[in-house]
Image: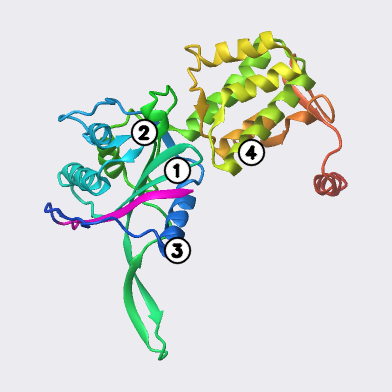
């Protein structure tokens, strides 16, 4: 990560007051070791799974909606920001415009971070909060201080400026709300000027359903279907670890290597159909992947969960009687059954 610009402005607002004050820093921050360490920490917090993605609903910006897209248009070009301080001051003022009409919310520190990863430029805007802390001085006395809360991010957004500038069709905005209540996430979404967010968990569930639907429509044999689902899950988990979105083309390549180019094309066609309408790239929610490799279900009296590759091996399903037959039961379960039935 190479940092080009870094600055922070303060928004002062109490939850009990409708008065909002912007305290703008007059110049950019020096990118020293301390700033680099804090920037990396913020990026690590942001890149946790479960973020939302989207695009600008009006890429040019508007007076009625968010002015943020227009401000980026005005100040950013291929070589960078023409005046980062002026840009961030205008963004902070736009943030205040959306914040001051909302009740029961507080201000904070607006962190603006423009950086590059290889040839791709990103803009990260984060709302940081202060919290009280205690330090031990050199004379072993205790002192109460205010410090930046770094245990979690409250609200944050990242724009892939390179993809946005190229008018890429992918969702070039990623953002998260932490545990902010709905009225807070609403004003932050309005500030961004983003389309209705698509949660990573929702997109992942659609990918899971898409993979199952593909196997069913193509009459993929059971063992091959289980293997394909496991491969898809593995590729997705790799992207979770790398904190990157997965491209549907990567999954299509796996299908082509396992089956044929024709079936890979059918997978992509199904992904773009009205039934699924999946983006070309999606962020993955790890927990939502479980349905790819496990069968599970429950009612008031029974809870079942098992790896999908056991079906047809130690577990068989009779569709006519809608029943499952288990072999190789867990030893702990066998002991319980034998003990109770032996009475």
Say which label, 2 or 1, has the lower sequence index: 2
User: What stretch of residues is rendered in magenta?
Assistant: 1-16
At which x and y percent is residue 29?
32, 58
Q: Residue furthest bottom?
A: 139
Marked residue nearer the N-terminal end (1 or 4): 1
Q: Secondary structure at mark 4?
A: helix
Sequence-wise, which precedes: disc 4 or disc 3? 3
Residue 33's label in the rendered image is 3
What element does badge 2 sit on?
loop
Location of mark 4 (residue): 238
Q: Which residue is mark 1?
A: 116
Residue 161 in the image: x percent, y percent? Answer: 38, 35
Q: Earlier in the sequence, mark 3 or mark 1?
A: 3
The Cα atoms of the two marked residues, 3 and 1, are separated by: 17 Å
81 and 140: which one is in front? Answer: 81
| Location of residue 51 in the rendering, given as x and y in whole percent from the top left corner | 45, 40
What is the CA distance from the residue labelled 2 to the residue labelled 1?
Answer: 12 Å
Q: What residue is shown at x 36% (from left), y 28% (from top)? A: 165
The answer to the question of whether label 4 and label 3 lie on touching residues, with beta carbons closer than 8 A, is no
Q: Which residue is mark 2?
A: 78
> Between marks 4 and 2, how big is the CA–CA gap?
31 Å
Q: Earlier in the sequence, mark 3 or mark 2?
A: 3
Dot 2, how many residues are within 10 Å of its Cα: few (below 14), some (14-19), or many (20+)? few
* Mark 3 residue element: helix
């Amino acid at each position: 990560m190479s940092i080009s610009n870094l600055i922070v402005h303060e928004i002062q607002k109490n939850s009990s007051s409708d008065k909002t004050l912007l305290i703008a820093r007059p110049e950019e921050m020096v990118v020293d070791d301390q700033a680099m360490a804090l920037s990396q920490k913020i990026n690590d917090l942001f890149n946790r799974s479960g973020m939302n993605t989207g695009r600008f609903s009006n890429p040019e910006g508007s007076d009625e909606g968010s002015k943020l897209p227009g401000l980026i248009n005005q100040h950013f070009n291929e070589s960078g920001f023409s005046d980062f301080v002026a840009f961030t001051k205008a963004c902070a003022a736009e943030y205040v415009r959306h914040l001051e009409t909302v009740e029961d919310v507080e201000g904070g520190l607006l962190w603006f971070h423009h950086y590059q990863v290889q040839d791709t430029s990103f803009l990260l805007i984060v709302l940081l909060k202060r919290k009280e802390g205690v330090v031990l001085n050199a004379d072993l006395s205790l002192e109460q201080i205010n410090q930046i809360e770094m245990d979690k991010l409250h609200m944050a957004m990242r724009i892939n400026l390179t993809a946005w500038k190229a008018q890429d069709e992918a969702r070039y905005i990623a953002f998260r709300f932490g545990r902010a209540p709905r009225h807070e996430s609403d004003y932050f979404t309005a500030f961004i000027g983003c389309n209705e967010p698509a949660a990573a968990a929702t997109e992942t569930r659609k990918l899971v359903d898409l993979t199952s639907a593909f196997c069913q429509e193509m009459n993929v044999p059971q063992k091959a279907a289980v293997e394909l689902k496991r491969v898809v899950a593995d590729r997705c988990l790799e992207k979770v670890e790398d904190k990157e979105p997965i491209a549907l083309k990567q999954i299509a390549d796996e299908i082509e290597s396992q089956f044929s180019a024709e079936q890979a094309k059918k997978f992509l066609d199904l992904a773009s159909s009205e039934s699924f309408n999946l983006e070309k790239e999606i962020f993955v929610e790890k927990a939502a992947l479980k349905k790819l490799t496990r069968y599970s279900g429950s009612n008031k009296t029974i809870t079942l969960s098992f790896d999908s590759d056991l079906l047809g091996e130690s577990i068989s399903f009779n569709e006519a009687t809608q029943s499952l037959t288990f072999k190789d039961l867990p030893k702990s379960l066998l002991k319980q059954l034998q003990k109770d039935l032996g009475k």
